Amino acid sequence: MIGICENCGNNYDKAFIVVIDEEEHIFDSFECAINKVAPRCHHCHTPIIGHGIEFEENFFCCGRCAKSASTHIAAHSVTYGTTRILLS
Ligand SMILES: [Zn+2]
Ligand SMILES: [Zn+2]
């Protein structure tokens, strides 16, 4: 398959498609895919390539960032996978 990476514009015969919400995105590398479509931490804007933390529809890279943001939203804990993290 030949495709042009939507992140860097490289035309590469081993490009691949990532489907998100039924929308197709073409990339030449995982690095480009991460830069373009990985969720970013709501606090520090780092791309989240692991599970991250989802809290009140925002994504965070780690508990510390979730805690920093939570001072504005008065949270006491966040759920990280199956683990509950206490913030106070
Ligand atoms: Zn690329
Ligand atoms: Zn962060």
Image: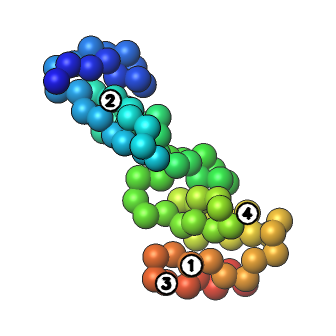
Between discs 2 and 4, the one toward the N terminus: 2
The secondary element bearing badge 1 is classed as strand
Quarter of the image where the N terminus is located = top left
Residue 69's disc number = 4
Residue shown at the point (34%, 40%) measured from the top left:
18
Mark 2 → mark 4, Cα distance in angstroms? 32 Å
Answer yes or no: disc 2 within 8 Å of ligand 1: yes
Classify residue 72 by image quadrant: bottom right
| Marks 3/2: CA–CA distance | 33 Å
Q: CA distance from mark 4 to mark 1?
A: 14 Å
Label 4 and label 3: CA atoms lie apart by 19 Å
Per the image, the residue denoted by label 2 is 27
Quarter in which the C terminus is drawn = bottom right
Residue pointed to by mark 3: 83
Asked if disc 3 and disc 1 are in contact, CB closer than 8 Å, the reply is yes
Q: Amino acid at mark 2?
A: Phe
Can you say whether 14 is above or below 56 in the image? Answer: above
What's the amino acid at mark 1? Thr
Q: Which residue is mark 1?
A: 79
| Residue located 43% across and 64% down the image | 51
**Label 4: how many Cα within 10 Å (few below 14, some 14–19, many 20+):** some
73 horizontally vs 60: left or right: right
